[in-house]
Amino acid sequence: MQRAVRALLGSRWPLLGMAGALAAVVVAIIVVATGGSLAVAALTLLAGLTLVGLVVVGASAREAEQRTRKTEKQLKALTSAVETVATSVQAVAERQADPTGGPLAAIIGAQRLDAAVRHDELVALHEELRADLHATLTERQLAELSALANLYAMLGADDEVPAFGGFAASPRTVLRLASLVRRLPSDALIVECGSGSSTVWLALACRRAGKGRVVALEHHERYAALTREALARHGLADVAEVREAPLEPVTVGGEKHDWYAAPQWTDLRGIDLLFVDGPPGSAGPRSRYPAFPLLATALDDGAVVALDDAQRQDEADIAADWLAEPVDSVRLADVDTVGRTRFFTASR
Ligand SMILES: C[S@@+](CC[C@H](N)C(=O)[O-])C[C@H]1O[C@@H](n2cnc3c(N)ncnc32)[C@H](O)[C@@H]1O
């Protein structure tokens, strides 16, 4: 009813109704005033009221019609949406029923095939890499093993030698050093930076060759004692000497380093073989750099210099610097690399 009244007020029908009702009242008054029949006046008033009633009913009917049309429109939209969903559901059902799987299955199938091929390729590549790695490791291990056997056959250690592995130079390096001893002059001087099993092997090589002596610089009291003990056990104390040399600050080529205390090496002259295997990296960056600049004048013409752990970046940089500039007219030349050790020769 409220809506009907609102609709009624929002149209021109109320004006017409009111105008009709007003006209009926005016007519009724004129009829009564002119002494006309009361019945006619009453009928006129009734007709006016009927007109107002008809206007209200008409407006309600119009509002109801508008609502019906709106509902019909909504129903139509809903029906269309339901039909769309039904069509999609039917399409999916048809695709599922299709034994070939339809275009969607073709796409998924192609992707699965792709993934399967990629997987097989990766597995094959992995196998190949594993085989390569295995072969490389075996080759390296074989080289070290054969060097070890060669070393024992050549030098016949008859007591326990400090173990290889860890901090010690590898058997391949020690074999090359030991075989060099045989080619050195009879009064050969071998100097080592950093003592350990290599000191014992070099001393064994000197004894077997019947020439040369070894001086090992060692900054660590405990390792100096261990190496001395091993030398004594082999009766090599007269062939090799371990000099305990604490690391002291030194400036070389503008760089500050900690290196073996000078009093322990300044007397060394005529070095034929210099094995640089210390100080360890824990002493600071490029800890082995000072060896050539500080010992260059003590090297004999044609001396061999060996730098261990050449695969490390620090050692690669050190080697490049050593090769770049002669020190007191002593120049180094690259010879070759054996395992992890790079060999150079010195010339004046
Ligand atoms: C690379 S090692 C020298 C090894 C020696 N030239 C050899 O081949 O046996 C350098 C220094 O490490 C220290 N060192 C030796 N053996 C060690 C060990 N087993 N553990 C920790 N440091 C060790 C010693 O002070 C030595 O001078």
Image (cartoon, rainbow, N blue to C red):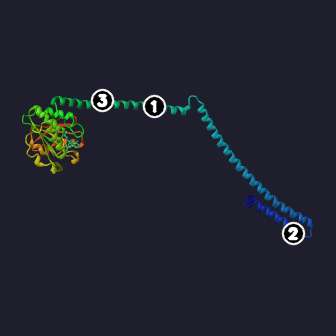
Decide: is 276 above or below 122.
below
* Residue type pointed to by label 1: Ala
Q: Nearer the viewer, mark 1 or mark 2?
A: 1
| Residue placed under numbered mark 3 in the picture | 135
Q: Earlier in the sequence, mark 2 or mark 3?
A: 2
Mark 2 Cβ inside 8 Å of ligand 1: no
* Percent coordinates x, y for residue 214 in the rendering: 12, 39
Quadrant where the C terminus sits is top left
Q: Secondary structure at mark 1?
A: helix
Residue density around tag 3, few if under 14, some if 14–19, many if 20 or more, within 10 Å? few
* Mark 1 and mark 2: Cα distance apart in space: 103 Å
Q: Position of residue 142 (x, y in %)?
A: 25, 29
Which one is nearer the viewer's eye here, 190 or 50? 190
In this image, 298 relative to 165: left or right? left
What residue is shown at x 52% (from left), y 31% (from top)? 106
Q: Which mark is residue 116?
A: 1
Please name the residue shown 11% across and 33% down the image.
207
- The image quadrant of residue 235 is top left
